[in-house]
Image (cartoon, rainbow, N blue to C red):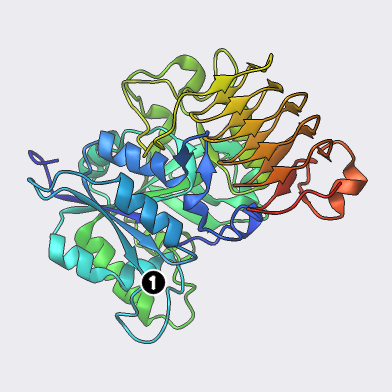
Amino acid sequence: MAAGPRVLGIVLAGGEGKRLMPLTADRAKPAVPFGGVYRLVDFVLSNLVNGGVTRIAVLTQYKSHSLDRHISTTWRLTGLQGDYVTPVPAQQRLGPRWFMGSADAIYQSLNLIHDEQPDYVVVFGADHVYRMDPRQMLRQHISGGAGVTVAGIKVPRDQASSFGVISTEPGSDRVSQFLEKPDDPPVLAGDPDHVFASMGNYIFSTDVLLDALRRDAEDEDSVHDMGGSILPLLTERGQAQVYDFDANEVPGERDRDHGYWRDVGTLDAYYDAHMDLISPEPVFNLYNRSWPIFTNQAQLPPAKFVAGGIASESMVSTGAIIAGQVTGSVLAPGVVVEEGAVVQGAVLLPGVRVGRGAVVRQSILDKNVVVPEGATVGVNSEHDAEYCTVSAEGIVALGKGQHVRL
């Protein structure tokens, strides 16, 4: 934003993602592949860069090698105007300890803010699937004169225990109450079935953020978390306002995918978000050229269909070779489906091989999993449960390099 205020983007990407196991057994949650060719972190970075925030620090910690490598090799902006996207691992700048929470992660990285001297700091999470123009949220933040603006979205009340929940003053954007994952959440006025949930995206006036982080660091009883500590603190001080994500308009979006946002923190949510991609009129449209999702495409030949192989209602990435039948699935680069194999409603990550005559249904197979000839995954629930992870909704998942049992 060269012609406007100085803005620094901080992306919180240190999450372990325990609920997404086994996909996070060997990588940080933001590094989990999504949509065939992307990583989850690509969505927030694309939103920021498309929206003109081009000085971005990505704070990493948990099993961050693949995430650091992806950022370093993919997100290389021109340095002529000082633009950058850089991974920043935990460095123990304030003593021999790692990040104790998202607020502590920023507090331990205050050198980034001191070096950049921004007017505003955009703090976004790294593991959601959505499109958003941050400029519109920034304009509201500036015009509203708040210390922090939090992006909010309506979610069903029965899901409130997974989010920070926001209450506002009547007829105002000012936040009157911020509750982290409440069991008995306040509902929206006139809509008892929904609550206003935090998306984990914040814009701070720099001086307010620095003061709040220092106060939080001095509080020995704090959990040092953005949602659990910083937002309640600024709400009590009357410095927090909410930005309604539904008001955000992204170039090229359609009515069907307006306001799409998914927290893919569980296997079921991750699977469902993939199914949102593949219909003829997708709920989330990856083909919006006006607001592209950027990534680093593998140098592979086009997908090939041989021996009568067919794929319908599916996304098939480069380097895939299909000799079997694929329906309702998302296939990442380098996937091989051999002759006679059947893949239905599956998410296959890079390098998966489905052997001759094998059957894979309603499953997520991580990188380089091999399904032997004649084997099945997602067909016999009792057999799968012996060695696979099975979600609450019955989605079968195998981690990177796991072996399929006959």
Residue drawn at 37 percent across, 74 percent down: 216
Please name the residue shown 37% across and 38% down the image: 295
- Residue 194 occupies quadrant: top right
Q: Check the image and name the residue furthest to the right.
A: 382
Q: Residues within 10 Å of mark 1 (few under 14, many from 20)?
A: many
Amino acid type of the residue that numbered disc 1 sits on in the rendered structure: Asp
Q: Does residue 191 appear in the picture of this structure?
A: no
Location of residue 7 with respect to 170 vertically, above or below: below
Left-right relation of 304 to 105: right
Dividing the image into 4 quarters, which one contains the N terminus?
top left
Residue 367 pos. (x, y %): 59, 47
Q: Residue furthest bottom?
A: 96
User: Left or right: where does residue 242 sit relative to residue 332?
Assistant: left
Q: Circle 1 sits on which residue?
A: 104
Q: Quadrant of residue 342?
A: top right
> What residue do we see at 25% from left, 67% from top?
210
- Left or right relative to 106: residue 98: right
Instruction: Decide: is 283 above or below 293.
Output: above
Q: Position of residue 261 (x, y in %)?
A: 50, 35
- Residue at screen point 37% across, 55% down: 69
* Residue 168 spot, x, y in % from top left: 45, 45
Is residue 160 in view? Answer: yes
Residue 44 lies in quadrant = top left
State the SS at label 1: helix
**193 or 56, which lies in front?**
56
